[in-house]
Amino acid sequence: MLDQVQFIKENDQDRFAIIPIDEYRFLKELLDNEEKLADYLDYLHLQRVKVQSNKRLSLAEIKHELSLE
């Protein structure tokens, strides 16, 4: 997201950003809906965790970790 951003400068400082209309609509809808925003933030967090750890656990290991056995 936001791969195609153009900046408008004023006094050598970025003052405005121009983004594709589809990305604007997606962001507007996301920011207008707390539930969608929370879901999206959860998704981003899960993606970050996934990258950090490739370890897979068996069902028995998960049950043990959660004290379900």
Image (cartoon, grey):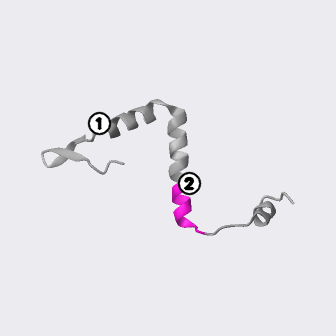
Quick one: 59 or 33, which is closer to the camera? 59
Q: Residue furthest right?
A: 69
What is the three-letter code of the residue carrying label 1?
A: Ile
Q: Callout 2, which amino acid?
A: Leu
Please identify the dominant SS of the magenta region: helix
Query: Which residue is drawn at the image coordinates 36% and 48% (left, top)?
Result: 1
Counting every numbered tag in the picture gives 2
Q: Which mark is residue 46?
A: 2
Q: Is residue 13 above or below residue 25?
A: below
**Which quadrant of the rendered structure holds the C terminus?**
bottom right
Q: Residues within 10 Å of mark 1 (few under 14, many from 20)?
A: few
Relative placement, left or right, of 64 versus 6 is right
49 is within the stretch colored magenta: yes
Residue most extreme to the bottom: 55
Circle 2 residues within 10 Å: few <14, some 14–19, many ≥20: few
Q: Residue at x 81, y 64 (%)?
A: 64
Q: Quadrant of residue 9?
A: top left
Q: CA distance from mark 2 to mark 1?
A: 27 Å
x, y (%) of residue 67? 83, 59
Q: Position of residue 59 (x, y in %)?
A: 76, 63
Q: Residue at 33%, 38% (x, y): give it.
A: 22
Q: Which type of secondary structure does the marked residue at label 2 adopt?
A: helix
Provide the secondary structure element on which disc 1 rests.
helix
- Residue 21's label in the rendered image is 1
Q: Verify whether residue 66 appears in magenta.
A: no
- Point out residue 57 in the picture as x, y percentages from the top left corner: 70, 67
Would you place residue 5 above or below residue 64 in this image? above
Relative depth, front residue between 31 and 3 = 3
- Residue at horizontal 50 percent and vertical 38 percent from the top: 37
Q: Which residues are magenta?
A: 47-54
